[in-house]
Image (cartoon, rainbow, N blue to C red):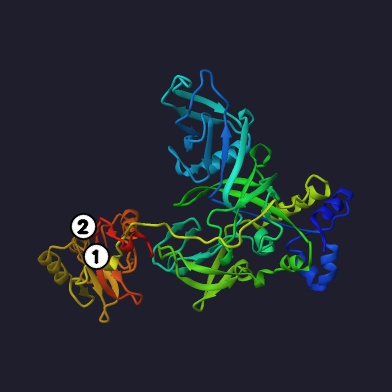
Amino acid sequence: MKTIKEINEKIRKGDAVIVRADEMPEIFEENPKRATREIDIVTTGTFGVMCSSGAFLNFGHSNPPIKMQKAWLNEVEAYTGIAAVDVYIGATQPSIDRGLEYGGGHVIEDLVSGKEIELNATAHGSDCYPRKKVQTTITIDDLNQAVMFNPRSCYQKYNAAMNSTNTLLHTYMGTLLPDGRNINFAGTGEINPLVNDPERETIGVGTNIFLCGAQGIVTGEGTQNSPSTCFANISTKGNLKEMSDRFIAGASITGYGASLFVGIGIPIPILNERIAEKTAIRNENLTTNILDYGIQQRDRPIIEEVTYAELFSGKIRINEKKVKTSPLSSLNKSIEIMDTLNEWIHEKEFYLSEPVQALPNDSTVKPMKLLKSVYRVGEIMVKKVITANLKDSIETVSSILVRKEIDQVPIVDKEDRLVGIVTSWDITKAVAENKKKLKEIMTTRLITSSEWEYIDTVTRKFEKYKINSTPVVDDKNRLIGIITMSDIIRNRVEKPKKGGANTE
C-alpha cells in the first residue's frame, strides 16, 4: 500500500518511477507484486474530438460601459447571459458566415495560437451600461481571464459507428459509407485515462490533470455520465492562456459542423495491486459495440461487439466481409501527452493531488421527456403502391403514369423486391433517345425508407437528396409502401403521448 503523499515525496526527491499505460501490461504480467511495489505512476492520455467543450472569457469593461446582450467572436455567437462582459463560447457553435466550416472550436484554437479575433457585441443600453455597440479586435493577452471548461469530456469508451443503409451519412462519428463499407471509432483504448481507473478510485473532484498543454483539474462528473454502462466521463477546467496549440485544435466534421480536439492526460497513482492490475489492461480485453448509425433513433441496433485490438488492426470481418476501420482519435498525440506528463513530473513541475470528493458511480442517463411523439413511416405511408415489373414495356409504364396521375412508378421483381424506379422524366428521355427497355431507363441506385423510421429522418432525406418521396422497403428489400412529402405535411402535427412522457 502507498499513499499519494508518499508518491509526491518521491517526486520531490526525484525517485518516482513512472511508466506509460501501454508499457504497464507487460511489466505487471511479469511480476504483479513487484510492479505494484516499484511503479509509482502510470501516465494515460487521449486526444480526440470532444464536442462538449468551451471557454469562459472576460473582456474587461469598455468606456462607456456595455452590458452585452449579443456577442460574436469571428462571427461565432457566444453566450452572454452570465455578466456584462463575460461570455461562454461553445466548441460546436457555427459561424454566421462560414457555417459548418468554422465555429467555436476554431475560435478557441485561434485564441490559444495568439491570433487576433474580431469581437462584435450589441446591447439594449441602460443607465449604468449606456453603450449599445462594440466592435474591436482582441488576442488572448487582452483578456482578463480565459478559462476552458468542458462539461463532458474524456469518455471511458465510445461506441464504434457503421452505416447499414444505401446512402452516404455524415455524422459526428465522421463520414459513414453506405452498405456497411467502413467503421469509424473513437477513443485510445488501453491508454485512455478512465479505462485505467474505471472505478475512479484515484480520479475525483480536484484531481490534477494535463489539459491541452496546461495543468487543469477535474471539476466533477460530466454530463450524461454513465459508469454502470462503462460510459463514465468527467468535466474539466483549465487556464486557456497556459495551453498549447500542439494539444488543442478546432475541427470541422463534414456535414455535422464545428468541434474541438482536446488533449487530456491523467496520472494514475499505483496505490495498491488492485489499481496496478487495472492499469495493466490490454486492447485485446477492452470491448465496445459497433452501432448502426443508419438507424436514426436513440437506441441504435448493435451490429457486433469487438475489441479495441480489432478496431486498431485496420480491418474487421463483418458478415463474412472485411470492413476497414478508421480511428477518430490520435494515438501519436496521446503518446506525446503521456510523455509530456512524464517529463513534467520528473522535472517536479507536476504533483499528484488527493481528490476532495469522489465521483458518483450510480449516475443514470434518462431520455428527454416529451409530451408528444413523432410519427413513424409505417403509420402514415401509403401501403397500396402502384408498381410495374421489368417485363413491362415503356409504353405500359407511361400509360400507368398518365392514367393514375402519378409522377413515378417503382419497379419490382416477381418476389416484390424493389429493383428500380421510373419517373415521367425517364419516359420523356426514353422517347427522345429511342430506348425500348425499362432496364435502360430506370434508376437503380435508390433512396429508400423503412417503416420504423421517424418522419423527421425521412424529411432530412428529402432535403438532402432534393426528392419528394421514397419507396418503403422491409429488411429483405421488398416493397411495402411509399411515403411522400404530402403524407408528411398531412401528418406533421405530433401525436399526443399517452401519460405525457416519452417512453420510446
Q: Say which residue appears at 15% left-offset and 65% top-offset.
A: 401
Residue tagged 2: 490
Question: Which mark, residue 32?
Answer: none
Is disc 1 placed on a helix, strand or loop? Answer: helix
Q: Say which residue appears at 62% left-offset and 30% top-offset.
A: 144
Left or right, residue 325 beside residue 385: right
Residue tagged 1: 380
Q: Position of residue 248 (x, y in %)?
A: 62, 46
Can residue 441 be seen from the camera position used here?
A: no
The residue lying toward the viewer, choosing from 435 and 336, is 336
Left or right, residue 481 beside residue 457: left
- Quadrant in which residue 133 is drawn: top left
Q: Do the residues labelled 2 and 1 touch (CB within 8 Å)?
A: yes
Q: Position of residue 11 (x, y in %)?
A: 84, 51
Can residue 147 be seen from the camera position used here?
A: yes
Q: Say which residue appears at 65% left-offset and 60% top-offset.
A: 194
The residue lying toward the viewer, choosing from 45 and 446, is 45
Total numbered circles: 2
Q: Quick check: 183 above or below 348?
A: below
Left or right, residue 447 beside residue 213: left
Amino acid type, residue under disc 2 in the picture: Arg
The residue lying toward the viewer, choosing from 163 and 429, is 163
